[in-house]
Image (cartoon, rainbow, N blue to C red):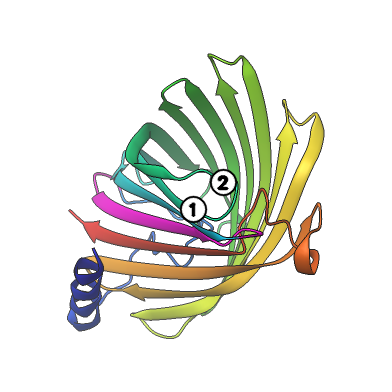
């Protein structure tokens, strides 16, 4: 895996460059841009969640996505989701690497880019895996000022565990600013505020706020985005005013995209 990522990055650095309409400036937030009609892409996601309140903890969540432009404004995606947890000297159980579920996603851009002050896009995703069904409606807002790109995502998530007849919900706001250095490189930072609720937004259980840098490398056929987040505040507060029971101390995400 490490060797594959290394060689992919080398290919990216030396390939012929161009700017794509759906360039992934961020790893935590979507822009409002969608794929051109009939375009097909493969994305390989890797998300690592690192560090709890005690012992060793590392959770790895890969995703494989096939993304297709139905029209210039409507993009649909099919995800295959995986999960693995390695934990030691703490109460958090380890879990072997396994396939956990499938997701179907739709993104619809409401207007032409630049038609209004902010570019909005609507998002819907449904996940099914085992006895869990998950619904994710979202709103993406994007604004560009020459080489500066600003983005905010408002995310809702409702999970239903059928066998246990249990429902939990989550609310998240992510955002970021990136500066496009040239046709190949963009750099910036991202924010993430994540809240867990019981039932359907009945009672707030915990929350955490993260911040960290993001780098994007773009070419005609490939793109690679990497983001590293550090938790800077959380409740219920534990060591150093962080929530390290229901959230992790660090999060790392990479996305490798390939035009098919």
Mark 1 and mark 2 in contact? Answer it, CB < 8 Å: yes
For the point 64% across and 20% down, the residue is: 166
Q: Is residue 161 visible?
A: yes
Question: Alpha carbon of mark 1 to alpha carbon of mark 2: how far?
Answer: 6 Å
Residue at the limit of the structure toward the bottom, as seen here: 181
Q: Nearer the viewer, residue 28 or 119?
A: 28
Q: Viewed as shown, does residue 205 lie left or right of 121?
A: right
Residue 238 vertical placement versus 73 (above, below): below
Q: Which segment did they paint magenta? A: 37-54
**Helix, strand, or loop for circle 1?**
strand
Instruction: Look at mark 2 in the image and give the residue it sits on.
Output: 92
Residue 255 vertical placement versus 107 (above, below): below
Where residue 213 appears, as percent x and y from the top left, is 55, 76
Instruction: Look at mark 1 in the image and give the residue it sits on.
Output: 87
Residue 178 vertical placement versus 33 (above, below): below
For the point 64% across and 69% down, the residue is: 211
Where residue 252 appears, as percent x and y from the top left, is 48, 65
Residue 67 vertical placement versus 168 (above, below): below
Q: Viewed as shown, does residue 43 lie left or right of 16?
A: right
Q: Nearer the viewer, residue 59 or 46?
A: 59
Q: Quadrant of residue 258 in the image?
A: bottom left
Residue 48 within the segment the image draws in magenta: yes
Q: Viewed as shown, does residue 58 lie left or right of 16?
A: right
**Helix, strand, or loop for circle 2?**
loop
From the image, give the main secondary structure of the stretch colored magenta.
strand
Residue 253 within the segment the image draws in magenta: no
Q: Nearer the viewer, residue 123 or 54?
A: 54
Q: Quadrant of residue 136 in the image?
A: top right
Q: Quadrant of the N terminus?
A: bottom left
């Amino acid at each position: 895996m490490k060797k594959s990522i290394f060689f992919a990055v080398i290919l990216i650095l030396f390939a012929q460059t161009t700017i794509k309409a759906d360039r992934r400036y961020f790893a935590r937030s979507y822009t409002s841009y969608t794929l051109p009609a009939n375009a097909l892409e493969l994305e390989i996601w890797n998300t690592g969640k690192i560090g709890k309140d005690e012992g060793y903890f590392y959770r790895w969540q890969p995703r494989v996505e096939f993304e297709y432009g139905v029209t210039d404004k409507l993009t649909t995606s099919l995800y295959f989701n995986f999960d693995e947890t390695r934990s030691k000297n703490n109460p958090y159980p380890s879990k072997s690497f396994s396939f956990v579920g499938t997701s179907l996603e739709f993104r619809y851009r409401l207007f032409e880019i630049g038609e209004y002050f902010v570019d909005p896009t609507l998002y819907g995703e449904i996940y099914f895996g085992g006895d869990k069904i998950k619904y994710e409606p979202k709103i993406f807002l994007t604004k560009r000022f020459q080489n500066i790109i600003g983005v905010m995502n408002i995310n809702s998530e409702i999970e239903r565990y059928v066998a246990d007849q249990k429902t939990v919900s989550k609310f998240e706001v992510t955002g970021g600013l990136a500066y496009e250095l040239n046709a190949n490189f963009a750099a910036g930072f991202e924010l993430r505020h994540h809240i867990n609720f019981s039932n359907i937004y009945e009672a707030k259980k915990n929350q955490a706020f993260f911040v960290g840098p993001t780098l994007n490398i773009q070419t005609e056929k490939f793109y690679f985005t990497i983001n590293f987040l550090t938790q800077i505040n959380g409740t219920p507060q534990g060591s150093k005013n962080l929530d390290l029971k229901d959230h992790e101390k660090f999060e790392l995400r990479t996305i490798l995209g390939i035009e098919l």
